Image: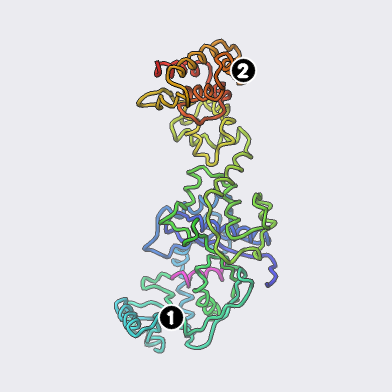
Amino acid sequence: MTAITGPVRVRFAPSPTGYLHIGGVRTALFNWLFARHYGGQFILRIEDTDEKRFVADATDDISASLRWVGLDWDEGPDVGGPHGPYVQSQRQALGIYQQHSEQLLEAGWAYMSFTSEEELAELRAASEARGHKAFRFRGPERDWPLEQQREVAASGKPYTIRLKLPLEGETRFSDLVRGGSEIVVQHEQLQDIVLIKKSGMPVYHFAHLVDDHLMGVTHILRAEEWVPSTPYHVVLYQAFGWQVPVFAHLPVILRQDGKGKLSKRKDDVATNRFWERGYLPEALFNYLALQGWSYDDKTEIMSRDELVSRFSIERVQASGARWNPEKLRDLNGIYIRKLSAAALAEQIEPFMVQAGLLSNPPSADEQAYLLRLVPLVHERLEELSQAPELLDFFFQAVRPGPEGYDPALLIPKKLDAAQTLSMLRAAHGALNIVEDWQSAKLEAALRDLSERLQVKVGPLFGTVRVAVSGRSVAPPLFDMLAALGREQTLSRLSLAAAALA
């Protein structure tokens, strides 16, 4: 493999055709790590030349999603730079692509194609009828003198500009992810692709290449779906007489079952959904770095600085990386547990507000109460959005009945309603005389009660847990009672007893 020397210049160039896919963030992350590791620059460029699929607020979502994950850029639409503008529609308005398409026309590397969509469809159908597996278009105008092409264009007939691909020979290029081995494609397997649409807007194959050259991009790290298109790009670089950048096509991210790649249509993979569900950006940053790359066969938890220092293109795998939501949740839980109680309270506060459990904005007393509750769920959270469900009974009334919990939950196995009622009343009495309402004192009172009643602690504690929380699984009982307070605890025990009386 060719040694990589800095400074390098790489780019992430998404199309604003919808919310940013998590696979796109992985591509951006690998570019960012590559740039930071080799002391280079990372460029953000918006490729908005697809007028039909353009989504108005997608550009803002792209920037917000990347910044949330923790990526910054040295040049881009909002930070500027020496090679701007960094939005292709703005570059189109400046005539940059027209100038370069004219250069190809004059040099005989491109031609004006007047073949209509209907004619293309007929040619494709005829090719299929002859048993050809692939339709490779070669426009008749490719052999016309440029003057003749310009005369027809001047008459008002719509046209595209197509690459005039050599009919014979081959194109070779190397790929760092595939060990630098050379990929060879015969020209007879290719066709004359469109460079400029009838609207005058450039297609991806042309615009990105012109921009990459003018912005000094040295290495192109992009999805492996672009491997079949790379021969066209190499031919274009050669047509312009430009240095061909180094290619590294990144592995696809597969669905969890390994059947096909992650899809916007089938999978919940919009980046903004991860912050909505309560993933920490540090956890997602770490996890995405492992989607197609590894440091060794055992290290998984790595900080940003560690990932920058350890990242190398040699360890990017060529085979697909399988998405694992459970592993991501586990990793997010690890990062949540690294937070201090105060930091976690700050993180879950917006989710509590959204659930209507806290005021908007929360009062100082509400914030203090939330901070007190955080230790009860700190070890259980895997997504921040789980906090309201785990903590809602501290903020809302809990009662048995049609609009609350099923009173049957109060009755332990092998006991009946009368025995449970007796336990609840005894628990109320035992807790009512506790003067110092702290978890240790509450535990001592209920354990003493268990001995006096000659019942096991499991059924007793379980009944009290359901009575005060409305659920059989809740935070540690005595810490929960201490946080809930004397008044609420005794009130809920009374309500539970009344339901069984």
> Tag 2's secondary structure?
helix
- Quarter of the figure that contains the C terminus: top left
Relative vertical location of residue 369 with respect to residue 249 in this rendering, above or below? above
Q: Quadrant of residue 176?
A: bottom right
Answer whether residue 207 is magenta in the image: yes
> Viewer-proximal residue, 213 or 333?
333
Query: From where the camera sits, is residue 85 visible?
Result: no
Left-right relation of 194 to 458:
left
- Magenta region, main secondary structure: helix
- Seen at 60% across and 32% down, the residue is 342
- Seen at 45% across and 24% down, the residue is 410
Which callout, 2 or 1, points at the residue further toward the start of the chain?
1
Relative vertical location of residue 349 with respect to residue 416 in this rendering, above or below? below
Specify start and end residues of the magenta stretch as a single range. Answer: 203-217
Answer whether residue 309 is magenta in the image: no
Q: Amino acid at mark 2?
A: Ala
Q: Position of residue 397 (x, y in %)?
A: 43, 23
Left-right relation of 314 to 351:
right
Q: Residues within 10 Å of mark 2 (few under 14, many from 20)?
A: some
Question: Can you tell which mark lies on residue 192?
Answer: 1
Relative vertical location of residue 196 with respect to residue 44 in this rendering, above or below? below
Query: From where the camera sits, is residue 384 visible?
Result: yes
- Seen at 69% across and 52% down, the residue is 306
The reply to whether dot 2 and dot 1 touch (C-beta < 8 Å) is no
> Tag 1's secondary structure?
loop
Q: Amino acid at mark 1?
A: Asp
Residue at which label 2 appears: 444
Q: Position of residue 70 (x, y in %)?
A: 58, 50
